[in-house]
Amino acid sequence: MKNPFEDLQNQAILGDNDFVARVRGEYLEKGSLREQPMYRDMVVERVDPAIVIECVTSVFGVSPEHVQGRYGSSVLRGIVSDLLYRYSGMMQREIGKYLGIDYSSVNKLRSRLRNRLVKDAIVARIKRQLSNV
């Protein structure tokens, strides 16, 4: 006998695609996404991971190989990891496999990126204050 929980979608709804689409249209898309974090993935469109990598590599003017694998730029891999997590709905383990790195490295890359962004924002604020002196 087939396990019925294999068809569980977003850890919330058990049913085929037509049923999930009907539930999403009737119940989920009307409320705030902040109030429905468990269902957010069902109503937000996902971006294909290849498109995320294509966008990042075109903006930075590098090849996809520069982003994927252990020996690419860690800053770019951090950016790609965070964007894949946010826009493609991938979990860190999936991102690690996709980029050819360990999933714990994905966590470290994303954490370092967040810390760097905070520091850059603080430095920018200090520079603005100094330019007014």
Image: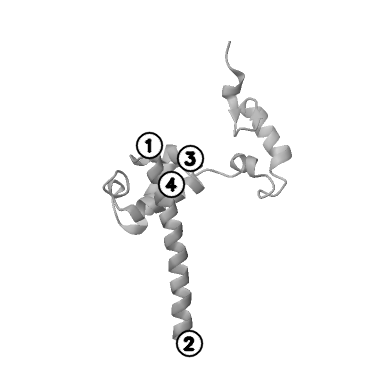
Return the x and y of residue 109 as percentages of the image width and height. Answer: 39, 51
| Number of the front mark, 2 or 4 | 4
Q: Earlier in the sequence, mark 2 or mark 4?
A: 4
The residue indicated by pointer 4 is: 107
Q: Which residue is mark 3?
A: 91
Q: Which residue is mark 2?
A: 132
Where residue 97 is drawn, which disc sits there? 1
Image coords of residue 57 (percent x, y):
34, 53
Q: Mark 3: which secondary structure?
A: loop
Q: The residue under label 4 is which amino acid type?
A: Asn
The residue depicted at 37 percent of the width and 49 percent of the height is 54
Q: Quadrant of the N terminus?
A: top right
Q: Which scheme is used to colour this image of the protein?
A: one colour
- Specify whether 47 is left or right of 37: left
- Foreground: disc 1 or disc 4: 4
How far apart marks 1 and 3 lie (CA) works out to 10 Å
The type of residue carrying mark 1 is Lys
Cα distance between the residues tagged 1 and 2: 48 Å
SS class, disc 2:
loop
The image position of residue 65, as x and y in percent, is 28, 46
Give the percent coordinates (x, y) of residue 19.
67, 28
